């Protein structure tokens, strides 16, 4: 990621490293653009626990006041809580101050449109246009913005989760679960331990002080969860939970202290929700094949989208899906709201575990078994990436004509799908790399698929550069 260059402006907002690539003036200017975009109306503002978040908050407030917005500040909250409040309070938009799973030195802002919905392409284009042309609708001296502090956001989110129709508090309480929650000193600290206690679990807290000094990586990768795994084992807990910095993701650790990828959170939740409500499921093209099997078992359709929460949400609206998400551990519960929500995931997983009467390891054993492999190929520029993906597609199309048994799926990059395995190549939106993801019944087969694809790409890249 660029350390000294410009901040990254992406589909969700603006991010950079504080003190180097994140220029605070850009934040104020984007807040002015957003205030203009919402017509000077009501905007929800909330922030994660990073030490730089109060500084960003001032910059955001300045931009919103200057454009005459009324700000409802919900304080330090997870991203899903902030978006839920935008929906509950029927705000015209929201700004979330967070860098999600990026390192602790990073920060940024994310935008949502009316009622906490992610911006559509048209809305995003309009916001960027206002920002680029500095077409700000500045309010006169007697119409400056105002602020009110809303202190009950977490309580409201908890209330919404606890009223979920699939939750049986007395069953969970009878199950006597012991759990460890590792909120990574992020925004999840202010809500997840409380939810677990309300559910009647015995709770051991790890990294649950929201002081913004992350004691592990903000991204809850298996490697980052060593302390959580050890604590689960040492305490004899039934399960370990971990969030990313803004708690829209949840990943799990088994009772044997084994960290799981976010694919398992989504697989368990999809199986659980489909057991309660039959309906369509939506996931990205690079999410585990487990979902195809789970959806088939429940007799429902699975829809695949491009990689990115926005695409999943859009499809979920379109097909009226009952559940959806990404393999990062971000699950979307349309009954609560259309955004990834790591807090609601805790309640769903606890209920699933209590109902099953099994250990997490047993739940895994009862699931379809696949192994994933992820690699990336560094490339000189985005333009080369496009040419390379096109060249690879031409090679695979030729193979198709020659009669191979794979199917080509062009939803995002190129995905070759066989009966029990797949491999997907696609350009990264943020880095000069091509990502190669594969999944197969064994780790060796998954790695072989990744390596073969990587070799094809390297050969093609040599041809392109000559
Ligand atoms: Mg996040």
Image (tube, rainbow, N blue to C red):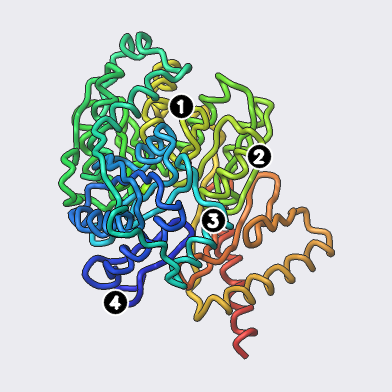
**Residue ID at (58%, 57%):** 122
Q: In the drawing, does residue 110 fall left or right of residue 337?
A: left
Q: Residue 343 location, x and y as percent?
A: 36, 33
Q: Which residue is mark 4?
A: 4
- How packed mark 4 is, by other alpha carbons closer than 10 Å (few <14, some 14-19, many 20 or more), is few
Q: In the drawing, does residue 84 fall left or right of residue 4?
A: right
**In the image, which disc is placed on residue 318?**
2
- 2 and 1 marks in contact (CB < 8 Å): no
Q: Which residue is mark 1?
A: 363
Of callouts 4 and 1, the N-terminal one? 4
Q: Residue 147 location, x and y as percent?
A: 26, 44
Mark 3 vs mark 2, foreground winner is 3
Q: Residue 235 location, x and y as percent?
A: 19, 28
Q: Which residue is mark 3?
A: 123
CA gap, disc 4 and disc 1: 46 Å
CA gap, disc 4 and disc 2: 41 Å
Q: Is residue 315 above or below residue 400?
A: above
Of callouts 2 and 1, the N-terminal one? 2
Q: Is residue 203 above or below residue 407?
A: above
CA gap, disc 3 and disc 1: 42 Å
Of 373 and 218, nearer the camera is 218
């Amino acid at each position: 990621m660029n350390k000294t260059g410009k901040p990254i402006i992406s589909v969700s907002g603006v991010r950079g490293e504080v003190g180097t690539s994140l220029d605070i003036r850009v934040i104020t200017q984007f807040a002015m653009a957003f205030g203009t975009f919402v017509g000077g109306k009501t905007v929800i503002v909330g922030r994660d626990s990073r030490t730089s978040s109060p500084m960003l908050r001032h910059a955001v407030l300045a931009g919103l006041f200057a454009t005459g917005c009324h700000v409802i500040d919900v304080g330090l909250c997870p991203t899903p809580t902030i978006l839920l409040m935008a929906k509950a309070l029927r705000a015209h938009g929201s700004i979330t101050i967070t860098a999600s799973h990026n390192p602790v030195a990073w920060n940024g802002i994310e935008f949502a449109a009316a009622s906490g919905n992610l911006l559509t392409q048209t809305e995003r284009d309009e916001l960027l246009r206002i920002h680029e042309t500095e077409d700000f609708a500045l309010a006169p001296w007697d119409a400056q913005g105002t602020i009110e502090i809303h202190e009950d956001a977490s309580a409201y989110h908890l209330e919404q989760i606890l009223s979920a129709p699939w939750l049986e508090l007395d069953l969970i309480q009878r199950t006597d679960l012991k759990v460890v929650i590792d909120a990574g000193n992020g925004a999840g600290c202010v809500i997840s331990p409380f939810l677990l206690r309300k559910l009647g679990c015995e709770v051991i807290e790890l990294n649950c002080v929201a002081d913004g000094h992350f004691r592990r990586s903000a991204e809850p990768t298996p490697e980052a969860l060593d302390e959580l795994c050890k604590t689960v084992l040492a305490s004899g807990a039934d399960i370990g939970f971990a969030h990313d910095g803004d708690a829209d993701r949840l990943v799990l650790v088994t009772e044997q202290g084994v960290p799981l990828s976010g694919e398992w959170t989504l697989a368990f939740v999809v199986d659980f929700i489909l057991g309660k409500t039959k309906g369509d499921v939506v996931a990205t093209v690079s999410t585990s094949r487990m979902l195809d099997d789970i959806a088939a078992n429940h007799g429902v359709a699975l829809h695949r989208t491009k990689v990115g929460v926005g695409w999943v949400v859009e499809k979920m609206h379109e097909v009226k899906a009952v559940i959806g998400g990404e393999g990062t551990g971000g699950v979307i519960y349309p009954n609560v709201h259309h955004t990834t929500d790591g807090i609601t995931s805790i309640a769903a997983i606890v209920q699933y575990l209590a109902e099953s009467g099994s250990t997490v390891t047993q739940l895994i054993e009862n699931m379809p078994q696949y192994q994933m492999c992820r690699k990336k190929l560094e490339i000189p520029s985005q333009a080369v990436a496009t040419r390379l993906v096109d060249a690879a597609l031409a090679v695979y199309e030729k193979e198709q004509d020659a009669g191979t048994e794979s199917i080509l799926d062009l939803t995002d990059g190129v995905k070759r799908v066989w009966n029990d395995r797949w491999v997907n190549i696609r350009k990264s939106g943020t880095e000069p790399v091509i990502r190669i993801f594969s999944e197969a019944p064994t780790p060796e087969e998954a790695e072989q698929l990744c390596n073969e694809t990587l070799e094809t790409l390297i050969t093609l890249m040599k041809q392109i550069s000559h």
